[in-house]
Image (cartoon, rainbow, N blue to C red):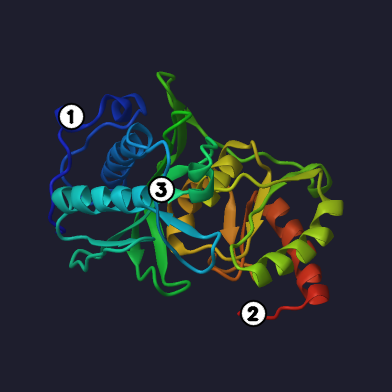
Amino acid sequence: MPGGLLPQPARVPPRAVRAGLTVPTPTTDPAALAVIALTVALEAGDLITQERPRDLEVAETKTSATDVVTVMDQRSQDLLLRRLGELRPDDAFAGEERGGRAGTSGITWVVDPIDGTVNYLYDVPAYSVSVAAVVGDPTTDGAWQPVAGAVVNPVTGERYTAWSGGGAWRAVGDDAPVRLAVAETDLATALCGTGFGYDAGRRAWQAEVLTHVLPRVRDIRRFGSAALDLCRVAEGSLDVYYERGLNPWDMAAGWLVATEAGAEVTDLAGGAPRATMTLAGPPRLRAALGEVLDRAVGTVGAEGLD
């Protein structure tokens, strides 16, 4: 049995208790892992909001000048790596920033320490901490699956939690958690979420595809955090969502939240979501959007979409 200690009730932050998750006995039951995901996500959320510098120092850049990595990104991931190591020492760890850990339990924690970094830099309150426990190899498309996860917006106090077979839940502040269910509608009346990459060539491709999607839906929204977008599909404040370029840490927890709320989360061919394309929505709506995207890609071209 995988090792590691679950947090006891006294160690779980009060907000985790208010999210409606009880602490089960030490086990690898997905509900137990969801408690840990929410606990550490809340702690990281406190860090990035309470210690956010007035003028953020940009530590380095990634793929382009607009894809920035802040000191707080790394500090948040370091906290998650340390806390998950304390609570689940036999589990592996993979995150967006530097630092990881191999494991022996079959569970890997896939985290995004700040999903929506640009929003964070500009102090736009639409960013999150995403923490998911997955089985399989998260570095290989189609070879992994989330079993528990939490997405926390530390500014608004929104907390989304899900575990396999346990449904998807949302709580804000002191409100009781509410079970989530996707919204059913037609594509023509659907509010569609999407996002754009940092690479200029990819953004140009995405803009061309968008011209084919926009006339077929009610409207488009671009919030800037894929994890939150997937959770919005789960709660129905977005009807459907698609994006090219998501990494495992972008989608892991949100994928499960959306799925447990009744959404299908797939690639363009209906398989597991991946970097080439991720779609999320109620089954009929996701299929309709997939047809539109198929035609769009056929027209724009699939260069780099492999």
User: Where residue 247 sits in the image (x, y, percent)?
Assistant: 48, 64
At label 2, the amino acid type is: Gly
Side of 226 where 213 appears, left or right: right
| CB contact under 8 Å: marks 3 and 2 | no
User: Where residue 4 sits in the image (x, y, percent)?
Assistant: 13, 52
- At 87% from the left edge and 52% from the top edge, which residue is drawn? 215
Of labels 2 and 1, the one closer to you: 2
Mark sitting earlier along the chain (3/2): 3
| CB contact under 8 Å: marks 3 and 1 | no
Compute the Cα span from label 2 to label 1: 49 Å
Residue 12's quadrant in the figure?
A: top left
User: Where residue 232 sits in the image (x, y, percent)?
Assistant: 58, 40
At label 3, the amino acid type is: Ser
Query: Quick one: which residue is furthest to the top in this view?
Result: 174
Task: Classify the position of the N terminus by image quarter.
Answer: bottom left
Mark sitting earlier along the chain (2/1): 1
Q: Which mark is residue 9?
A: 1
Question: Residue tagged by mark 3?
Answer: 130
Question: Residue tagged by mark 2?
Answer: 304
- At 24% from the left edge and 54% from the top edge, which residue is drawn? 81
Q: Secondary structure at mark 2?
A: loop
Residue 208's quadrant in the figure?
A: bottom right
